[in-house]
Image (cartoon, rainbow, N blue to C red):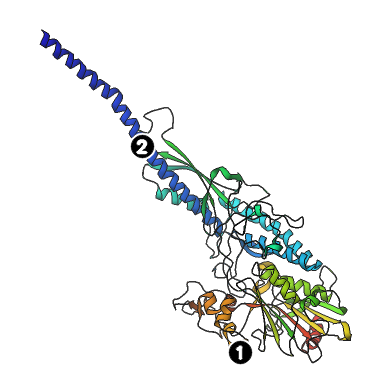
């Protein structure tokens, strides 16, 4: 009887242990397995959504808008290589990044103040006002693109559909048991020191007027007002590459910032027999809510900018011994007339002609020098340092007759001034829809020079910039910057960001004038430095720069200016 009792007791214990395992250990194991699977799925979903947010940020940087004042604008700079951004002349156009524009306007505000030049100050204020609308239009384009409203394209003319790109990426990278339920994309900005820019504060620091708290590593901080002479300036968050940023710093878009930060809210559904094992009435383990924020990228502003030429057809005129003299309104004007070029490049194109143009303010010679000097600086963006501009203005002229001063923006922030005996640019040509001014004036000593200013970069973009859209006119041959007869060589060109070493391109046909690679896919003007073919041909002026502004001062000896005056008057009748 005792043996039977012990066996019965041990059997009961076995039953209890078995029941315990079935009622406690097995469910607990299932819960732990479910939690583990949930954590794995959540990690995979979060990683996928974060990567998709970077995809959205990259797409945001691809969007290009056609601004009526500045031309093609984007979050990123792009060189003139895009198939979808061709000027009427058939060549591709560059894209300027919004931060580059903001930095350019702010730096030129400093230069106007340091020069004490009211004309430049008024022009830069006009650009700052236009910049406000550009920012508003860019914010609107981003908002529409993120909400899948409107059609936006990149530099190659390809449509940018952010929601489709993000959805496709997430669905292709999720495991089979995870499915997208909803995706919401939005834009905003960052607080608490969030974000970066690639825009350096003006140099030298004594001119920058930027507090230490408004810069990091010599770069402007984004999303904060960095005022200058009671004028607000704020930059977008954009780095050298797209990157994730903290969610807790994100703020919804408003009208006071360039709202470049992308936020993604994604809901993902989990499949599986055990997903609601713990709570059959809830989606606690069946639904994943994932969020991420990313800052887009911006490419650097590359390639040479426009060149300013100053030609004395006679001896240097007394009283006009430096740019400082030219920018002062100390001329005694007889007549100052501004012409607008219509119908093509004057006088190269047969239908081109000069049409008299009435500027908003009464023209004067000093004002004209200041205006076109400013347009040349604006074309250079952030290339020159402030002190380089001030040195250029104060350097004296020592040119002999028929010599040509060329002013170019160097890669190190300096402004290169050279005297060359041979001009690579078409003499006396003004680009379509651009401005030419003839000044019949006198200066001290009774000398009465005739001054012609031909500006190819005063009007920008496809709407107002003419057949070249405000891009500088290319020189001939295309490799003039590397040739000794034009005062250059390969190493000098490299210092200016030009030529074979500066652009990393090989030029196949220096005398090419009319051929277009888009007409013949087997024809190339440029190849890579290693000899391989380029998928996209850049604008010809990308190799050695182009003529932005040409100024001819007819002094003591003969000048073509007087002939041009009579020609323009005849054409204007």
Task: Work out whether 120 lies above or below 228.
Answer: below
Residue 38 vs residue 555, the one in the foreground: 555
Task: Work out whether 93 lies above or below 129.
Answer: below
Residue 202 vs residue 85, the one in the foreground: 202
Coordinates of residue 336 in the picture (x, y in percent): 84, 78
Question: Horizontal placement of 252 versus 442: left or right?
Answer: left
Q: Residue at x 20, y 15 (%)?
A: 12
Query: Can residue 196 be seen from the camera position used here?
Result: yes
Q: Residues within 10 Å of mark 1 (few under 14, many from 20)?
A: some
Could you tell me which quadrant the N terminus lies in?
Answer: top left
Taking the view exactly as shown, the residue that stands out farthest to the top is 1
Question: Horizontal placement of 537 versus 354: left or right?
Answer: left
Taking the view exactly as shown, the residue that stands out farthest to the bottom is 557
C-alpha gap between disc 2 and disc 1:
75 Å
Coordinates of residue 150 in the picture (x, y in percent): 59, 54
Quadrant for residue 365, please give it: bottom right
Query: Can residue 458 be seen from the camera position used here?
Result: no
Q: Which residue is mark 1?
A: 485
SS at circle 2: helix
As drawn, the label of residue 163 is none
As drawn, the label of residue 36 is 2
Question: Horizontal placement of 272 versus 8: left or right?
Answer: right
Residue 104 vs residue 276, the one in the foreground: 104
Task: Work out whether 46 lies above or below 487.
Answer: above
Marks 2 and 1 close (CB-CB < 8 Å): no
Q: Residue at x 38, y 31 (%)?
A: 276
Q: Residues within 10 Å of mark 2 (few under 14, many from 20)?
A: few
Q: Reading the chain from its start, which is encountered first: label 2 or label 1?
A: 2
SS at circle 1: helix
Coordinates of residue 525 in the picture (x, y in percent): 52, 80
Task: Work out whether 265 lies above or below 75.
Answer: above
Question: How many labels, in total?
Answer: 2
């Amino acid at each position: 009887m005792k043996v039977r009792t012990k066996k019965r007791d041990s059997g009961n214990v076995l039953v209890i242990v078995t029941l315990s395992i079935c009622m406690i250990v097995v469910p607990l194991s299932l819960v732990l397995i479910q939690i583990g699977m949930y954590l794995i799925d959540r990690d995979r979903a979060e990683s996928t959504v974060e990567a998709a947010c970077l995809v959205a940020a990259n797409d945001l940087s691809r969007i290009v808008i056609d601004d009526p004042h500045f031309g093609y604008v984007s979050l990123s700079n792009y060189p003139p290589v895009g198939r979808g951004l061709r000027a009427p002349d058939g060549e591709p156009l560059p894209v300027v990044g919004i931060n580059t524009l903001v930095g350019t306007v702010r730096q030129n505000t400093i230069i106007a103040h340091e020069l004490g030049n009211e004309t430049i100050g008024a022009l830069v204020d006009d650009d700052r006002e236009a910049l406000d609308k550009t920012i508003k239009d860019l914010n609107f384009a981003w908002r529409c693109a993120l909400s899948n409203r409107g059609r936006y394209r990149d530099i190659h003319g390809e449509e940018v559909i952010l929601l489709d790109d993000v959805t496709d990426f997430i669905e292709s990278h999720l495991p089979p048991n995870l499915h997208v339920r909803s995706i919401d994309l939005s834009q905003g900005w960052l607080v608490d020191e969030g974000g970066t820019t690639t825009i350096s504060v003006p140099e030298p620091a004594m001119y920058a007027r930027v507090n230490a708290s408004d810069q990091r590593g010599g770069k402007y901080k984004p999303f904060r007002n960095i005022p200058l002479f009671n004028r607000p300036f704020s930059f977008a968050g954009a780095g050298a590459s797209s990157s994730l940023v903290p969610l807790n710093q994100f703020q919804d878009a408003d009208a006071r910032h360039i709202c470049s930060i992308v936020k993604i809210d994604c809901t993902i559904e989990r499949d599986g027999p055990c997903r609601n094992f713990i709570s059959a009435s809830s989606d606690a383990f069946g639904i994943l809510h994932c969020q991420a924020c990313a800052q887009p990228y911006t490419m650097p502003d590359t390639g040479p900018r426009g060149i300013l030429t100053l030609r004395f057809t006679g001896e240097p005129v007394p009283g006009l011994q430096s740019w400082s003299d030219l920018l002062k309104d100390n001329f005694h004007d007889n007549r100052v007339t501004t012409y607008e070029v219509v119908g093509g490049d004057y006088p190269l194109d047969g239908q081109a002609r000069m049409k008299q143009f009435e500027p908003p303010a009464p023209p004067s010679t000093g004002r004209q020098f200041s205006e076109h000097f400013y347009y040349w600086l604006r074309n250079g963006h952030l290339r020159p340092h402030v002190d380089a501009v001030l040195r250029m203005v104060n350097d004296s002229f020592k040119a002999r007759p028929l010599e040509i001063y060329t002013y170019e923006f160097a890669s190190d922030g300096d402004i290169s001034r050279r005297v060359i005996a041979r001009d690579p640019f078409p003499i006396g040509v003004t680009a379509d829809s651009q401005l030419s001014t003839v000044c019949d004036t006198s200066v001290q000593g009774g000398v009465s020079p005739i001054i012609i200013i031909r500006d190819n970069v005063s009007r920008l973009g496809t709407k107002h910039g003419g057949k070249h859209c405000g891009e500088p006119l290319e020189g001939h041959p295309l490799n003039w910057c590397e040739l000794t007869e034009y005062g250059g060589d390969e190493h000098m060109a490299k210092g200016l960001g030009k030529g074979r070493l500066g652009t990393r391109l090989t030029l196949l046909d220096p005398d090419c004038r009319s051929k277009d690679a888009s007409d013949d896919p087997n024809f190339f003007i440029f190849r890579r430095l290693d000899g391989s073919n380029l998928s996209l041909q850049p604008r010809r002026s990308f190799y050695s720069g182009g003529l932005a502004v040409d100024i001819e001062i007819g002094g003591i000896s003969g000048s073509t200016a007087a002939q041009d005056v009579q020609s323009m008057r005849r054409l204007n009748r």
